Image (cartoon, grey):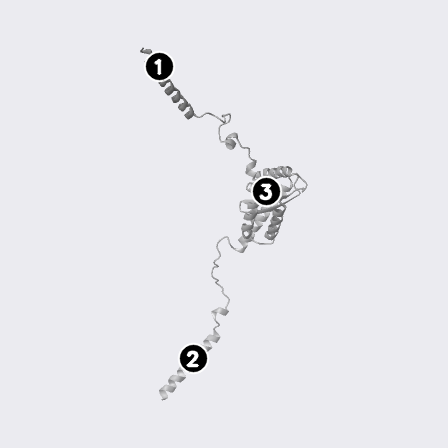
Amino acid sequence: MRIWLCLLLAAILLAGCNTASQKASPSPQGQPNNNPRAQSTAPGNTPSAQNAGNQNQINKQAHLEQLVKRVPGVKGARCVVLGNTAVVGIDVDGKLERARVGNIKYTVAEALRKDPHGAGAIVTADVDLNNRLAEIGSKIRQGHPVSGFATELADIIGRIMPQMPRDTVPRTENDVQGRKPGASVNQPSTQSHTYKSKANQNKQRNNNMQMAPQGNR
């Protein structure tokens, strides 16, 4: 009996010692983590990298907008850059004829083609699309990632009849017609000459065969 009491007291003392040590040593969860684990953020996808990327796109957009505004006939410009593609909306006088608007778009495309950031640009003068580009540009300047507007930009591009800067490069007759300069459009085929030649030979042979019996009389 005395042995059991001793064992029980020993167990109580051990339990008390463990509780005291736990109170004296705070849980690691309550301590500041001096060695934080590396975050599972992919390289180049950190907030600082995203901000730097946004600022780079904003600088390109501002540069292209200023470039386009210098074109005669352009009253304002909106630009959104996504990667190597830039969508540029221009404001023109609403009273202009469509042909004149087309000429202004072409001049804008020529100006963009000469700039390293504008060679892959798409130009539009549509009012609704310009408003959408203005909204996207405003959100990007507020810090929203450019990649978040990829779907909307794809929809805008799909609605544009694009005036691509590379289309302003003069094209040769070979590129347009697919034949050598000065070549005749309607040249008779060699095969038809062959068929006609064989037909004439057969006709002459038949005439000779018909005339042969008359010569023997």
Q: Amino acid at mark 1?
A: Met
Image quadrant where one finds the C terminus = top left
* Residue 163, position as x, y percentages in the image: 57, 40
**Quadrant in the picture for residue 166:** top right
- For mark 1, what is the residue? 211
Q: Amino acid at mark 2?
A: Ala
Q: Nearer the viewer, residue 53 or 86?
A: 86
Secondary structure at badge 3 equals strand
Residue 175 versus residue 61 in the image, above or below? above
Look at 52% across and 30% down and name the residue there. 173
Q: Nearer the viewer, mark 2 or mark 3?
A: 3
- For mark 3, what is the residue? 123
Q: Where residue 25 is drawn, which disc sits there?
A: none
CA distance for labels 2 and 3: 79 Å
Q: Amino acid at mark 3?
A: Val
Badge 2 density bin: few <14, some 14–19, many ≥20, Cα 10 Å: few
Secondary structure at badge 1 equals helix
* Of the image marks 2 and 3, the number of the one nearer the N terminus: 2
**Quadrant in the picture for residue 74:** top right
Image quadrant where one finds the N terminus = bottom left
* Of the image marks 2 and 1, the number of the one nearer the N terminus: 2
The furthest residue to the left:
216
Is 201 placed left or right of 142 in the picture?
Answer: left
* Residue 212, position as x, y percentages in the image: 33, 14
- For mark 2, what is the residue? 15
Say whether residue 6 is visible: yes
